[in-house]
Image (cartoon, rainbow, N blue to C red):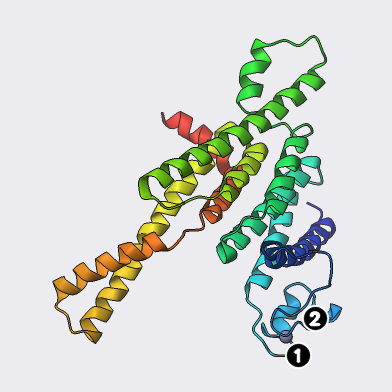
Amino acid sequence: MDPVIASGVFALGLIFGSFLNVCIYRLPRGLSVVLPGSACPHCGKHIRFYDNVPVLSWLILRGRCRKCQGRITARYAVVELLTGFLFLCCYWNLGLTIAMLKCVMFGFLLLGLIFTDAETHLLPDKMTLPGLAFGLIISLFVPINDLASLLLSSAVQFPVSSDFSWRLFSFMDAGFGAIIGSSFLYGVGAIYLRARGVEGMGFGDVKLMAMIGAFLGVRLTILTIFAASIAGSLFGMWTVLAVWIKRTQRRKHVFHESGPAARRRAWGSAVVALRRHQMPFGVFLGSMGLVAFFYGQQFLRWYWRLL
Ligand SMILES: [Zn+2]
């Protein structure tokens, strides 16, 4: 790894992270990400270039606007740093290659979608659909080596060059990944709607999974959905427990209820709270998609050996 290139890549990541913050704020609000330039979300004042340096400006101004002293959330610095490290990590693993471009693009889109979903419960089409198209196209240049490649390449012999056939199989893998990922999520959403009468998953999640599928292929897509469901359930249980404990304490101390009665009533309201609270499932799908991209193959190899 060349230290000069590595620092350049990291700096580029910080700049892209800064742009990603603009997207996270503006895309769900239907605003242009190009014009006008950066402005304070509180007073609307234009932010000068010297106050717009990734991470540093946020630290120097201690997370406040220079003009109105309004709070600027730590998310700005966090997203910039994460994008910087993402770029560095892709370069570290893959060098300056097309595979690195794919890795960078996937991580960039997912970071944006994760934070947008967490803040607004929206997954903008302007991120997922171009992402889906990019994932399909890049599969023609970076092999996915999934089911179609593994099963078909030995079974079907094309009367054309091997260079053409691996691209075709890789593209099929991306396509199958997108179809399986989105239809799986669509199915789960439909069952959820039937069973609980509330919409647990929107079309945003379905399109997000189509995009993830195009980047990962079928196997890692299924792995992503399973891992995200487990992570989401654990998070849900943790939330219920936390709310339950907190409300039991309050009932005991404020309303002077007896232990068992306080626990019983608090449990009821904790379950209701979870049902009302819409979990941003895209956060779990996105982060598990990233984990699967970096560690999924290793995990599957380890898993098959275990069986
Ligand atoms: Zn301001």
Determine whether 143 is above or below 51 in the image. Answer: above
Depth check: give the residue in front, 230 or 176. 176
In-image side of 98 versus 131 (left or right): right
| First along the sequence among labels 1 and 2 | 2
Q: Residue at x 47, y 29 (%)?
A: 304
Which mark is on residue 285? none
Front-lying residue, 65 or 199: 199
- Is the residue marked by circle 2 packed among few (<14), some (14-19), or many (20+) residues within 10 Å? some
Image position, residue 140 (x, y; %): 78, 31
Q: Secondary structure at mark 2?
A: helix
Q: Is mark 1 within 8 Å of ligand 1?
A: yes
Examine the rendered structure and indicate whether residue 202 appears above or below residue 241: above
Q: Which residue is mark 2?
A: 51
Q: Is residue 103 visible?
A: no
**Vertically, is 44 above or below 121?**
below
Quadrant for the C terminus, please: top left
Give the x, y percent position of residue 106: 69, 48
Residue drawn where x is 73% and y is 36% of the image: 136
Residue 269, position as x, y percentages in the image? 29, 68
Q: Nearer the viewer, residue 233 or 57?
A: 233
Q: Residue at x 62, y 62 (%)?
A: 116
Residue type for callout 1: Lys
Instruction: Determine if residue 185 is in view.
Output: yes
Q: What is the spatial separation of the Cα atoms under label 1 and label 2, in whole angstroms? A: 11 Å
Quickly name the residue at label 1.
67
Amino acid type assigned to the residue bearing label 2 in the image: Asp
| Quadrant assignment, res 21 | bottom right
